[in-house]
Amino acid sequence: MTIDLKVLADNRDALILAEVAALLHDVGKFCNLHIEAHTGGQRSWSNDHAYKVVTDAPQSVIHLSKAAASLKKPNALNNVLNAQSPKAADFISDVLKDWLQNNTINLLNESYSLAELIMLGTPGFATNENRSQLLNRKSGWLAAVLGVCHNEAHVDKEDPPPGQGNQKLPNVFISTAFGYEEQKVVIGTSPESLDNRLQKLPVPPTRDQILGEFSYGLGRHSSASQ
């Protein structure tokens, strides 16, 4: 069978933007609060998905269909729409928020802002039985693809049993898959802290810039797996 790759070439720019959204899908975890919330600190997010909320007003980005009012919605969607402070948007720069909200991917007759993909790209949204009816004039398929990829990535980094394996402040280290802990996560107010690095993330960010900065953070919410 011959596979025609022309569709990929024709949509090159949209696919590159989609890759940026995928790289930034958990950008809210790259801040002091997220490390504190999962390693013995006193602060926590406003709800379980507030770290995904990259705009000040998510309702202005995610437009629900009329049918959504009578449908059971996934917790991830409800949490994103109802998140209060603290949420990810409190920690990223205004210029990055504007860029995420105003850059749109047009692919296969549906349009999504980068902010929309980041906020909707969760396993809970992807697998919800009503997903294709929740958004106004689109099925949510592209966000669902991101959500499925997000879920599959956890196969090789299972969470530890409750109460076991979590690092504790102030000694939180980045480790490799082989367990080498050579770099301490910096939080607080120093120029090297996660908050300051997040504020200074270039806009528009390139793939290499994103990966370079994210090497200073943890690979998942509660442990030092990279």
Image (cartoon, rainbow, N blue to C red):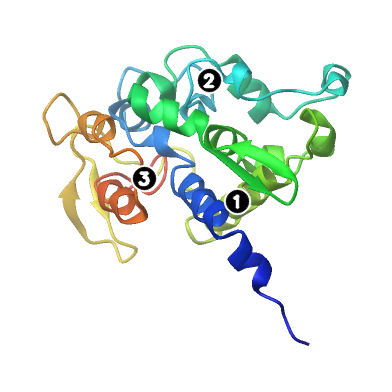
Counting residues from the N terminus, which is met first, the one under dot 1 or under dot 3?
Answer: 1
* Of callouts 3 and 2, the N-terminal one: 2
With respect to residue 99, does 224 lie above or below? below
Q: Pointers 3 and 2 in contact (CB under 8 A)?
A: no
Residue ID at (65%, 25%)? 62
**Where does label 3 land, which residue?**
223
Question: What kind of element bears circle 3?
Answer: loop
Quadrant in which residue 184 is drawn: top left
Depth check, front residue: 175 or 151: 151
- Between the residue at mark 1 and the residue at mark 2, the CA separation in whole angstroms equals 20 Å
Q: Is residue 168 visible?
A: yes
Q: Are marks 1 and 2 in contact (CB under 8 Å)?
A: no
The residue that mark 2 highlights is: 47
Q: Residue at x 67, y 39 (%)?
A: 111
Query: Where residue 114 sits: x, y (%)?
Result: 53, 38
Residue at 70%, 23% in the rendered image: 63
Q: Quadrant of the C terminus?
A: bottom left
Q: Secondary structure at mark 1?
A: helix
What is the crowding at mark 2: few (fewer than 14 residues within 10 Å), some, or many (at least 20)?
A: some
Q: Amino acid at mark 3?
A: Ser
Question: Counting residues from the N terminus, which is met first, the one under dot 1 or under dot 2?
Answer: 2
Q: Amino acid at mark 2?
A: Asn
Of discs 1 and 3, which sits in the foreground?
Answer: 1
* Residue 198 located left or right of residue 189: right
Q: Is residue 200 above or below residue 71?
A: below
Q: Which residue is mark 1?
A: 151
- In this rendering, would 187 be left or right of 126? left
**Is 94 rendered above or below residue 174?**
above
Q: Where, by quadrant of the figure, is residue 87 drawn?
A: top left
Camera-side residue of 161 and 62: 62
Dot 3 surroundings within 10 Å: few (below 14), some, or many (20 or more)?
Answer: many
